[in-house]
Each structure stands twice: as structure tokens, then as C-alpha cells.
Image (tube, helix red, strand yellow):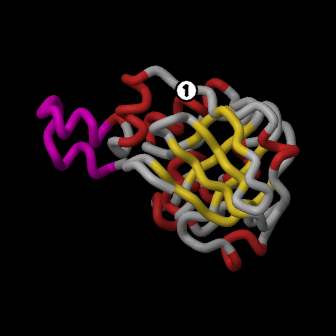
């Protein structure tokens, strides 16, 4: 991996139509962001948080992140997930990924190019994802530079804070 925007980690695979309710179950919605991170996939993959290492990667199918606008992207980020690549992201979920500074991108062919346990490397500099076991490299769909800036800058509140548009104490609520 090279470049300032290169990341990599062990792959955890999920299928199509993964709902935000699975990522962040309803009973956890009114708890702190730190507590919510401890509930990621607790109902459908309870081993995920026990076995996941910081920087590990989620590979998803089509319509990943469907459902409500709950802050599942923040919970994935806070749980330590390095990034997410999916065949197609639900639009509302993608916007929440941008807002909360969680790296999530579309990557056609990703669900068949990786097996659970493989290592995925992502380069945002050249918009590629590589399976280090097979050597296969896929094109990642770029997102607009303004959205990428927010995503890489930690989300919309930290970006507004860095630009002096909101006070520091307001940004820490997210």
C-alpha cells in the first residue's frame, strides 16, 4: 500500500440489503455513541465485535445500508471498521457515511472478488481495491471531491469546525 489514502484489513462479508437495523439495533438508539459502537451487528453476527480488529473491512452486496437514517455509519466507524466496500450503497446510508466520516464506497464486483478472511487494500489516491490473496484489483467508484473531503475529514461537523464555521464544543456531540 502506498499513498496517504491507502488502508487495508481483514474482510468480513455481508450480503445484499443489509439494513441499518442490523448494524445498529433499535434498543441502542438512545444510548451514547460509545455504547452504540458496542452493539454493531450484535443480533445477526454476535462474533463480529469479539473477533474484529481495528481496521478490518466490510465487503457488502447490493443496497447495503438500506432502512432508516439511524447513525449506523458512526457506529461502524467508532467500532473500528477501517472501511466498507459494497456493490451498491443505499443513498441515505452513503450520506450518513459522509456526515460521520466513515469510509464507504461502491466497488462493482467486490462481493465475488473477496472471501471472508481475505485481506482488502483500498487506495483512494487511485480509486482501487485489491485482494492481497488473489492479487485481483477492482475499480472503486469515486465520489465527488467535496463529499470525500468531508468523509476523510471526520465528517461534516469536524469539517465545519476546522473551517471555523461552528464552535468546537458543538462538533464534539457527534
- Asked if the magenta segment contains residue 171, the reply would be yes
Task: Using the rendered view, name the quadrant where residue 67 is placed.
Answer: top right
Q: In this view, does 62 lie to the left or right of 55?
A: right
**Residue placed most toward the observer, 128 or 159:** 128
Crowding near pointer 1: few (<14 within 10 Å), some, many (20+)? some
Residue 80 vertical placement versus 173 (above, below): below
Question: In this rendering, would 20 be left or right of 165?
Answer: right
* Residue 23 appears in the rendering: yes
The magenta stretch spans residue 139: no
Q: Report the residue at 49% width, 39% height from top.
A: 124
Of the pair 119 and 173, the residue shown nearer to us? 119
Q: Please provide percent x and percent y for residue 95.
A: 53, 29
Q: Mark 1 points at which residue?
A: 142
Instruction: Name the residue rendered at 77%, 74% in the picture.
Output: 47
Residue at screen point 74% across, 53% down: 135
Query: In this picture, which residue range is highlighted in magenta?
Result: 157-173
Amino acid at each position: 500500500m502506498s499513498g496517504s489514502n491507502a488502508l487495508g484489513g481483514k474482510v468480513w462479508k455481508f450480503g445484499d440489503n443489509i439494513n441499518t437495523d442490523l448494524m445498529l439495533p433499535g434498543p441502542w438508539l438512545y444510548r451514547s455513541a460509545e455504547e452504540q459502537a458496542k452493539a454493531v451487528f450484535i443480533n445477526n453476527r454476535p462474533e463480529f465485535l469479539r473477533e474484529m480488529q481495528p481496521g478490518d473491512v466490510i465487503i457488502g452486496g447490493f443496497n447495503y445500508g438500506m432502512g432508516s437514517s439511524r447513525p449506523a455509519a458512526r457506529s461502524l466507524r467508532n467500532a473500528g471498521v477501517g472501511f466498507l466496500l459494497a456493490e451498491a450503497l443505499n443513498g441515505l446510508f452513503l450520506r450518513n457515511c459522509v456526515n460521520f466520516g466513515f469510509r464507504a464506497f461502491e466497488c462493482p464486483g467486490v462481493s465475488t472478488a473477496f472471501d471472508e478472511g481475505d485481506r482488502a487494500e483500498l487506495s483512494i489516491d487511485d480509486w482501487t481495491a485489491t485482494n492481497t490473496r488473489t492479487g485481483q484489483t477492482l475499480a472503486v467508484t469515486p465520489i465527488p471531491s467535496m463529499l470525500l473531503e468531508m468523509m476523510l475529514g471526520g465528517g461534516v461537523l469536524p469539517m465545519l469546525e476546522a473551517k471555523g464555521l461552528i464552535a468546537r464544543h458543538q462538533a464534539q456531540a457527534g
